[in-house]
Image: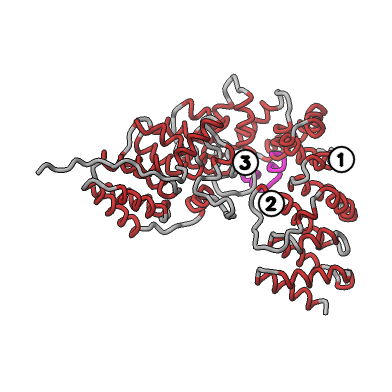
Amino acid sequence: MRRQAWRLPEAAVDARPTFLSHALASAALHGPGPWPHGGYPLPDEDPDEVRVMSGAVEDGVRTHHFRFRPDEAGAAETAEELERLVGSPPTTTDLAALHDRLAAVDTLTIADPLTAELRRRSLPRDRLREIALRLTGHGTRRNAVATGIVLLGLSGDERDRELLLVLGTLEDLSLYAVVALLRSQPEPPHAVFELARRVDGWGRIHAVERLAGTGDPEIRSWLLREGFRNGVTGEYLAHLAATTGGLYAALLDEEVDDALLDGAGDILETLAGPAGPAKNIEDYPDGPPALCRYVALVRTRPPHPGRVTVLLRLAKFLDTEIAASLDWDERTRSALRETCLATAKEPGWRATVASALAEGDLPAFRNALWPARQLGIAVGEHLRWRLRAHPDDGYLWQCLLDEHPAHEIAEVVAFAQELLPLPELVTGPATDPGFGRDRAFDRVLGLLVNHLAEHPGQGGPLLGVALANRLTGNRNTAARALAAWPAESVPPEMRARVREAHHREPDPDTKKGLRELLDSWS
């Protein structure tokens, strides 16, 4: 009897959108990447479900800050199932069961032990690749597709480069695509470099970390100019860029272009900043000479607000104990600090900040606020004008609060009552954490109410709205603010609102806090 040939059946018809179709649609709409919001929302996400963090953020935090337990048993079970499927032709039902089982696992916890287990079993590479392609090409659930990418890293080749790149441009899948590219492509660093340029969040971090130590001139040049930048925090990649990219040596070149100069400034500012999640200036022996060289160069170039900011932040750093502990003498450090301050205060440098406040777009305006305040440039009227156009911008509200002394809080409160859609924020209590762009006004409300604790009698309408808002945090913030007031400063109508809020409160802890607040007035 002739042995049946091993082959996959035709893919089953599934009404659910695949991750690949979502990625291809994003590429058609937005180009190769980075894509808006990292490709979110994903096709398997419930639009009504509020997520605390995305899969990309969760994997990034777990890989960088927490030890997670590998799921050895789950990996062994998956390997056993794969061995069975490559041993005899799987049915459509078999493949659907594999997909749905993988959809329910935590890919991060099985990826490494599954890799080790499959290598030990030496499964037929071509058959494993076919299963990987089915999962990545037709998968409709995140973890099933992510595991398919893991399998493609073990069984794929140069034919799969573009598939891995397009799926990896979805930030949720970037980590798995980076590792798969390293394992499957003939020139791994260049494949990872290509993906690194297509993403800008945790995906950028995962990709660039795998480029550490490269000697490729193109990659090193990109690291210093752009590659260290990401949407999470610069601390993750600044030291890697400075060392792998050869920052100090690059600054010694006769021709230092503006992109390199500004990249160097941002890298050095980040390294000199507060201690973060990665190595800093204390771990960078070339720090002192690189700082001196940067300041010498930037003084000769046209100013812009970003350069003003870097000089002012470096001046603050140079006045710290950490700066004093570096390998340079006190005279050099003090002179460098004075040069930073003097340059930032020059009329032309001040003028570029003032221009960004008056004429720049919103991102430029936001970036100019901090240096403007450091240079003594008034920003209050500019903030009010911008807030009329962008009343949901929490950063602008925080800056306005910082700009006004405590005795002027009534002006800020009145301005907020004018601009915020307060009736729309009386949503009724819910257990909403407040994430998402559609909760921007809710978060602004909480920011403002948080400042009322120190101002008894002020902001009654804001407090009343916060007590009836959907964000649990806002109701708690309002209760804490009122608890900080002297009892005699709480008017009867506010006490009535607290009683009503207590009656309607769905969160047990918040309800308890409201009860304690009411009891304190008895």
- Gap in angstroms between the C-alphas marked 1 and 2: 26 Å
Residue that numbered label 3 is attached to: 270
Q: Which residue lies furthest to the top in this view?
A: 254
Is there any visible trace of residue 405 in the rendered image? yes
For marks 3 and 1 on the same chain, the one whose residue lies earlier in the sequence = 3
For the C terminus, the quadrant is bottom right
Residue beneath the point at 72% across and 62% down: 428
Q: Mark 2 points at which residue?
A: 439
Q: Which dot marks residue 381?
A: 1
Q: What element carries label 2?
A: helix
Closer to the camera in the image, 141 or 336: 141
Labels 2 & 3 near each other (Cβ < 8 A): no
Which label lies toward us, 2 or 3? Answer: 2
Q: What is the chief secondary structure element of the magenta stretch?
A: helix
Sequence-wise first label, 1 or 2: 1
Image position, residue 25 (x, y; %): 51, 35
Q: State which mark lies toward you, 1 or 2.
A: 2
Magenta stretch: residue 253 in it? no
| Residue range corresponding to the magenta coloring | 314-325
- Residue 68 vertical placement versus 306 (above, below): below
Kind of residue at badge 2:
Arg
- How many labels, in total? 3
Tell me which amino acid carries mark 1: Glu
* Left or right of residue 335: residue 94: left
Viewer-side residue, 369 vs 17: 17
Q: In this view, does 262 lie above or below 132?
A: above
- Reply yes or no: does residue 324 show up in magenta: yes
Residue 118 left/right relative to 175:
left
Asked whether, in this view, residue 179 is left or right of residue 420, the answer is left
Q: Which amino acid does label 3 sit on?
A: Thr
- In depth, the one of 373 and 411 nearer the eye is 411
